[in-house]
């Protein structure tokens, strides 16, 4: 039976402004400039440009003032932090009184005081672009060689072009020959069969680079070894090692990939020295035959990391700077401000405004409110980022001073949130996709966060420190007899780290290190 009842409940919802602010916090410095350009295009009341020299000179260094940034944030009536809350603008009403009050309040504000840029670079700095080299793509390189194959007719040439077009950027033909037959029939109106495709593929595999058009890694390595075996530039001893390597790849690839070296010696009836020579020949090969060629303007585009922060060592004292180079100075458009001023003057002299003028003024108010909020949001983003990074700097001061990963302290998002008064989700957004430039290289902020691990002496250390020591142990091990996870656990415990074998395996996998058997060398 359906019943109706009245009830009250309290819900917490994010306003559109808060959602936009969260998105701005997640944007790295490299893409912030594009986001600002989009807002400039969408809102005509928002303008980009320098301000007057005499206006609010103290604003230039507000991000550098540590006391201001590290102070306790304002609390609301319930004692909750409102650092992540922004000013919410009331909906526009057509009431003349409310509109007049807004005009009076707006005219008293100094709109041009919203300044974002930290003057930490010279005005004479030039924006420099890196020239891109003009080169043929990988597929163009293959098509240029087709003329060397001397096909009997135009039909075979088109089939070869279709096969080359099906080769991926690594140089592999991962498309089935039956699918290529269908592609030729539908796109070229050419009727072919798989046997004909295989014959033409064999000819394409003679092109450079060696190993091109292979279906598997095993086939790619075999094609490269076959090309070396057919060459005349190798000595008799080198040819013997190449032939052995070709036999290993073609007949014993499973044993080779699993590093069952003792089994390979028995099956091939060779000694350890011969096996080592053969494996050395295989390791010289390229697992991705097309890796040395450009595959197009988009696929080989360079990805540059733009650091969001810079930490400098000034005679033993660390200085933090926020990279705001691509956050230009923003202000409300003077034209829109003048239009409001003219409307305000009209009201003062007693002239009545018609409905069209009211609608125009309300439109202007909407755009100006949106511009003012966006300027505030950008400024709050800069302050929140600086506050978060400043706290990380204080916690990891010894690391940033020396660059020694063993001096990294245990640190989680909750620690930074408690020290800054920010919400954990806000700290997470700041740390996501952000980088800091130090004298030891450019580091990801997320790499500084780690859980703690207790030593035998009761001291808490960072798991990053344990991973660094684990990396050093594995790097110095005897590769002929690599250490198992159990032995790694024992070595770490001898150094005072109370750790389980499964934890060692987890850290090893996170470091991208294989198990002991796959680390074995001869």
Image (spheres, rainbow, N blue to C red):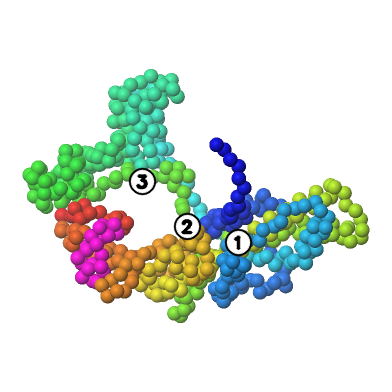
Residue placed furthest toward the right: 350
- Mark 2 or 1, nearer chain start: 1
**Residue beneath label 1, please?**
85
Q: Which residue is mark 3?
A: 291
Q: Is residue 296 above or below residue 381?
A: above
* Secondary structure state at the residue bearing disc 1: loop
Q: Considering the whole magenta stretch, tell me its main secondary structure.
A: helix
Q: Position of residue 273 (x, y in %)?
A: 11, 52
Q: CA distance from mark 1 to mark 3?
A: 49 Å
The correct choice, above or below, for 342 with respect to 197 in the image is below
Per the rendering, the mark at residue 433 is 2
Magenta span covers which residues? 488-507
Residue 265 screen position, x and y as percent: 10, 47
**Mark sitting earlier along the chain (2/3):** 3
Q: Nearer the viewer, residue 515 or 303?
A: 515
Q: Earlier in the sequence, mark 1 or mark 3?
A: 1
Answer whether labels 2 and 3 touch (C-beta < 8 Å): no
* Residue 27 is one of the magenta-drawn residues: no
Residue that appears at 84% across and 47% down? 356
How far across and down, in percent of the image, does residue 371 sit?
68, 57
């Amino acid at each position: 039976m359906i019943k109706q009842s009245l009830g009250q409940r309290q819900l917490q919802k994010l306003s559109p402004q808060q959602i936009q602010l969260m998105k701005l916090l997640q944007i790295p410095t490299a893409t912030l400039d594009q986001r600002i350009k989009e807002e400039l295009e969408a809102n005509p009341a928002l303008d980009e440009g320098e301000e007057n020299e005499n206006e609010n000179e103290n604003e230039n260094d507000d991000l550098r003032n540590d006391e201001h940034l590290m102070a306790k944030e304002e609390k609301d009536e319930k004692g909750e932090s409102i650092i992540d809350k922004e000013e919410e603008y009331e909906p526009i009403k057509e009431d003349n009184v409310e509109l007049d009050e807004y005009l009076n309040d707006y005219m008293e504000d100094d709109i041009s005081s919203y300044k974002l840029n930290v003057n930490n670079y010279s005005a004479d700095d030039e924006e420099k672009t890196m020239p891109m080299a003009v080169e043929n793509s990988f597929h163009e390189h293959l098509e240029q060689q087709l003329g060397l194959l001397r096909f009997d007719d135009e039909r075979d040439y088109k089939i070869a072009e279709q096969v080359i077009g099906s080769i991926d950027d690594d140089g592999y033909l991962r498309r089935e020959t039956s699918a290529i037959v269908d592609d030729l029939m539908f796109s070229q109106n050419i009727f072919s069969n798989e046997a004909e495709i295989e014959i033409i593929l064999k000819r394409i595999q003679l092109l450079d680079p060696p190993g091109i058009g292979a279906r598997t890694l095993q086939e790619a390595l075999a094609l490269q070894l076959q090309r070396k075996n057919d060459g005349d530039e190798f000595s008799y001893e080198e040819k013997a090692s190449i032939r052995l390597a070709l036999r290993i790849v073609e007949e014993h690839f499973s044993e080779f990939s699993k590093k069952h070296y003792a089994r390979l010696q028995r099956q091939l009836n060779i000694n350890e020295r011969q096996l080592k020579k053969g494996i050395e020949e295989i390791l010289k090969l390229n697992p991705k035959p097309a890796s040395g060629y450009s595959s197009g303007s988009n696929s080989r585009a360079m990805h540059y990391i733009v650091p969001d922060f810079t930490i400098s060592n000034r005679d033993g004292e660390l200085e933090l700077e926020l990279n705001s180079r691509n956050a230009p100075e923003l202000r409300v458009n003077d034209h829109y401000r003048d239009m409001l001023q003219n409307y305000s003057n009209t009201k003062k002299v007693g002239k009545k405004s018609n409905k069209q003028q009211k609608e125009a003024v309300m439109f202007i108010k909407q755009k100006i409110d949106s511009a003012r909020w966006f300027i505030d949001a950008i400024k709050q983003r800069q302050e929140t980022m600086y506050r978060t990074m400043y706290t990380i700097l204080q916690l990891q001061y010894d690391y940033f001073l020396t660059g020694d990963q063993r001096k990294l302290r245990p640190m989680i998002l909750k620690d930074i949130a408690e020290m800054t008064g920010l919400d954990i989700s806000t700290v997470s957004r700041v740390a996501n996709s952000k980088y800091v430039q130090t004298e030891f290289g450019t580091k990801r902020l997320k790499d500084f966060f780690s859980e703690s691990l207790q030593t035998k002496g009761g001291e808490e250390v960072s798991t990053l420190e344990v991973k660094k020591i684990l990396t050093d142990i594995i790097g110095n091990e005897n590769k002929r007899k690599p250490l198992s996870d159990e032995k790694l656990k024992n070595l770490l415990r001898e150094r005072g780290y109370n750790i389980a074998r499964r934890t060692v395996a987890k850290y090893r996998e996170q470091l991208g290190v294989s198990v002991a058997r796959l680390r074995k060398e001869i």
